Image (tube, rainbow, N blue to C red):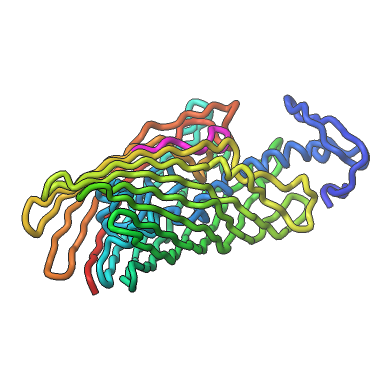
């Protein structure tokens, strides 16, 4: 029930009396104006909920929120592997770790002889800022640490076969913007995510020039979100809390071509996938209801070239296209509630294009220096921006070094991202008009070698 009117019972339309609304809502009979304007409440509720669901997309896509992802476009991970990250993941043609191969091009698993291990941890300093001026007085900055593990192993089999396992993800990433009662926000914006992806891959050497590979990537994630919709005309705030978790599944495949000695061309394809997430949330007048999401995951195509330019200098470039518009095909559905409460997970999604370039230089017999640069455009449209999640067109610079020992190599990598703030006016803002910005840095430590 909502104000004595069955939400599911409809017979005719009444115009919403809220000033400037112009929408109609179906009701059983004449009711008070605040009841008739349920369409406006629903629009406000669903708009804010959509901002949280963007975080669900961020959480549950395969391999999302690896350190570079958390600091780049914000939704789609750039890659995996510590030295690969130091080269901005411009290692699609020749991955430097089994983790990078399992993520972007499984054919690269054939590049590791015998049994090989890579392991690392990322320490991420994530920064965000929201400034509502000149539209409101709300303003806050957020900075916190999160962590990201990355482990992988590869094994050389018989007759040209190679196999690999990889585990990567993140813990504790999110935004925590404080409340500001003077600006009309009596509760803050909280959204925290954790995700783990597990890849099982294999590669086969067709001949000396051609290698093919494939991997299956199951994952599991969890999100916690809390925010509030400010009440209208003296009404109390409506607090929104929900927690979603569930498994997902995707696959990727790749090919490596070595036309000449020291030249590597790679192509990776990540298939469309699906996430099955469930939880619960409270609906106005209906109480707590189950909340379910079958989310379509985007297809990705990645191409790259790597080359041994000299005995000491190794370089690479890559480009990736992601069909992130597929997020718009997924809907949140509330159990035992009118279909009118179901809503699209993601509004105004765009394709992502990511460009990377990097190199490594062995300046001493045991010491190699690495550096890279990447750029990714925004994929979240202005209508979907909120303090719970937003992305910017970011540029990332990375640098690192590798110190080789007899069997093992130690890797250190640093990453910093920067980009322009995004300005959203009141005619497009999902929750809060103003400017959105962020960035941050990451320190990644790892080891790799034969076992």
Badge count: 0
Q: Is residue 377 magenta?
A: yes
Task: Provide residue 77's location: percent of width, then percent of height.
Answer: 42, 50
Along the line of sight, the residue nearer the viewer: 163 or 18: 163
Confirm whether residue 6 shows in the render.
yes
**Residue interval drawn in magenta:** 375-384
Along the line of sight, the residue nearer the viewer: 382 or 36: 382
Q: Is residue 137 above or below residue 227?
A: above
Q: Is residue 350 above or below residue 68?
A: above
Along the line of sight, the residue nearer the viewer: 116 or 284: 116
- Rendered residue at 66%/60% (across/down): 280
Q: Is residue 226 left or right of residue 41?
A: left
Quadrant in the rendering for residue 99: bottom left
Check the picture and name the quadrant holding the C terminus: bottom left
- Rendered residue at 93%/40% (across/down): 11
Task: Provide residue 308's location: percent of width, then percent of height.
Answer: 18, 47
Quadrant in the rendering for residue 426: top right
Q: Is residue 448 left or right of residue 62?
A: left
- Rendered residue at 58%/49% (across/down): 53
Along the line of sight, the residue nearer the viewer: 21 or 76: 76
Q: Is residue 146 magenta?
A: no
């Amino acid at each position: 029930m909502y104000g004595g009117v069955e939400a599911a019972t409809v017979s005719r339309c009444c115009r919403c009396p809220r000033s400037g609304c112009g929408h109609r809502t179906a009701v059983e009979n004449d009711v008070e104006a605040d009841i008739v304007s349920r369409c406006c409440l629903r629009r406000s509720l669903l708009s804010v909920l959509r901002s949280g669901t963007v975080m669900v997309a961020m959480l549950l896509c395969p391999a999302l929120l690896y350190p570079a992802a958390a600091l780049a476009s914000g939704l789609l991970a750039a890659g995996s592997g510590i030295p690969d990250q130091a080269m901005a993941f411009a290692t699609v043609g020749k991955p430097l770790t089994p983790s990078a191969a399992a993520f972007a091009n499984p054919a690269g698993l054939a590049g590791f002889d015998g049994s090989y291990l890579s392991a690392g941890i990322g320490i991420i300093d994530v920064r965000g800022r929201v400034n509502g001026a000149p539209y409101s007085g709300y303003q806050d900055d957020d900075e916190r640490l999160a962590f990201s593990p990355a482990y992988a192993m590869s094994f050389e089999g018989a007759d040209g076969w190679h196999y690999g396992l990889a585990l990567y993800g993140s813990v504790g990433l999110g935004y925590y913007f404080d409340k500001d009662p003077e600006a009309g926000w009596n509760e803050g914006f909280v959204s925290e995510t954790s995700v783990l992806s597990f890849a099982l891959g294999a590669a086969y050497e067709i001949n000396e020039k051609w290698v093919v590979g494939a991997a299956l990537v199951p994952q599991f994630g969890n999100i916690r979100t809390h925010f509030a919709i400010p009440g209208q005309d003296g009404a109390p705030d409506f607090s929104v809390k929900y927690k979603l978790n569930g498994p997902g599944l995707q696959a990727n495949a790749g090919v490596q071509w070595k036309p000449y000695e020291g030249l590597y061309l790679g192509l990776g394809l990540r298939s469309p996938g699906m996430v099955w997430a469930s939880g619960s949330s409270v609906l106005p007048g209906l109480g707590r209801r189950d909340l379910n999401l079958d989310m379509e995951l985007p297809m990705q195509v990645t191409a790259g070239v790597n080359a041994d330019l000299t005995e000491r200098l190794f370089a690479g470039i890559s480009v990736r296209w992601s069909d992130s518009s597929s997020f718009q095909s997924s809907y949140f559905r509330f159990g035992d509630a009118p279909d009118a409460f179901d809503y699209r997970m993601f509004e105004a999604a765009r394709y992502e294009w990511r460009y990377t370039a990097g190199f490594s230089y062995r300046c001493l017999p045991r010491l190699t220096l690495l550096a890279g640069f990447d750029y990714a455009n925004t994929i979240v449209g202005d209508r979907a921006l909120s303090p719970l999640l937003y992305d910017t067109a970011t540029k990332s610079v990375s640098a690192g070094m590798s110190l080789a020992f007899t069997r093992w190599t130690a890797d250190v990598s640093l990453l910093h991202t920067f980009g322009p703030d995004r300005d959203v006016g009141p005619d497009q803002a999902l929750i809060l008009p103003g400017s959105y910005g962020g960035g941050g840095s990451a320190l990644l430590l790892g080891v790799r070698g034969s076992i």
